[in-house]
């Protein structure tokens, strides 16, 4: 019985190795950086929204300024004209250790962004935000946004 088990195990192992094929070396992923206001400071361009690339005729840039925790948002989401929105932001760590980004618009008295965002990943060149609802126990996120470091184009 032991001999039969050894033969079956060896056969399964060899078939398993054969079906996997050669192992391809993977490129190292970009290292994460600490999620701080200093590390998110700068210009970011929205490149991916809900798992799909942003449409060519839609542009969204956000420029976070560490000093004073201000931001300028440039977007043409609902129009062909670039809209410029300014405000302040706050980055804090919740009781679960998640980094949460929230903001207030300048154009209205204390009107907050419609969502708070968990910074789920931050590298030197990419930032991933997920819509976050305080107290939610679900792991499903309504929106996932991926930003890449960018330069502001001349919008004129």
Image (spheres, grey):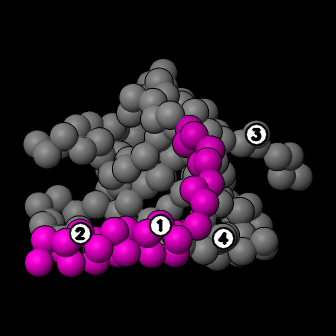
Compared with 29, 59 (above or below) is below
Q: Nearer the viewer, mark 2 or mark 1?
A: 2
Indicate the position of residue 91 as horizontal and vertical percent values.
33, 37
Part of the protein shown in magenta = 1-30
Quote the CA–CA distance across marks 1 and 4.
36 Å
Around disc 4, counting alpha carbons within 10 Å, would you say few (fewer than 14), some (14 to 19), or many (20 or more)?
few
Residues at marks 3 and 1 touching, judged by CB atoms closer than 8 Å: no
Determine whether, in the image, residue 120 is placed left or right of residue 122: left
Q: Earlier in the sequence, mark 1 or mark 4?
A: 1
Which numbered tag is attached to residue 6? 2
Q: Earlier in the sequence, mark 4 or mark 3?
A: 4
Quote the CA–CA distance across marks 3 and 1.
47 Å
* Viewer-side residue, 116 vs 33: 33
Residue 142 shows in the view:
no
Residue of label 3: 151
Q: Nearer the viewer, mark 4 or mark 3?
A: 4
Compared with 34, 104 (above or below) is below
Residue of label 1: 17
Q: Secondary structure at mark 1?
A: helix
Determine whether, in the image, residue 23 is placed left or right of residue 122: right
Q: How many marks?
A: 4
Residues at marks 1 and 4 touching, judged by CB atoms closer than 8 Å: no
Compared with 11, 48 (above or below) is above
Q: Earlier in the sequence, mark 4 or mark 2?
A: 2
């Amino acid at each position: 019985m032991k001999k039969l088990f050894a033969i079956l195990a060896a056969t399964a192992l060899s078939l398993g190795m054969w079906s996997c094929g050669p192992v391809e070396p993977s490129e190292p992923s970009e290292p994460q950086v600490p999620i701080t206001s200093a590390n998110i400071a700068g210009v970011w361009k929205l490149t991916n929204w809900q798992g799909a690339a942003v449409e060519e005729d839609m542009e969204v840039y956000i420029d976070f300024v560490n000093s004073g925790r201000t931001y300028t948002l440039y977007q043409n989401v609902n129009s062909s004209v670039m809209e410029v929105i300014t405000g302040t932001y706050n980055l804090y760590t919740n009781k679960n250790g998640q980094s949460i980004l929230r903001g207030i618009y300048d154009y209205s008295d204390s009107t907050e962004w419609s969502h708070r965002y968990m910074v789920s990943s931050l590298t030197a060149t990419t930032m991933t935000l997920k819509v976050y609802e305080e107290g939610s126990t679900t792991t499903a996120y309504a929106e996932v946004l991926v930003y890449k470091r960018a330069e502001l184009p001349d919008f004129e």
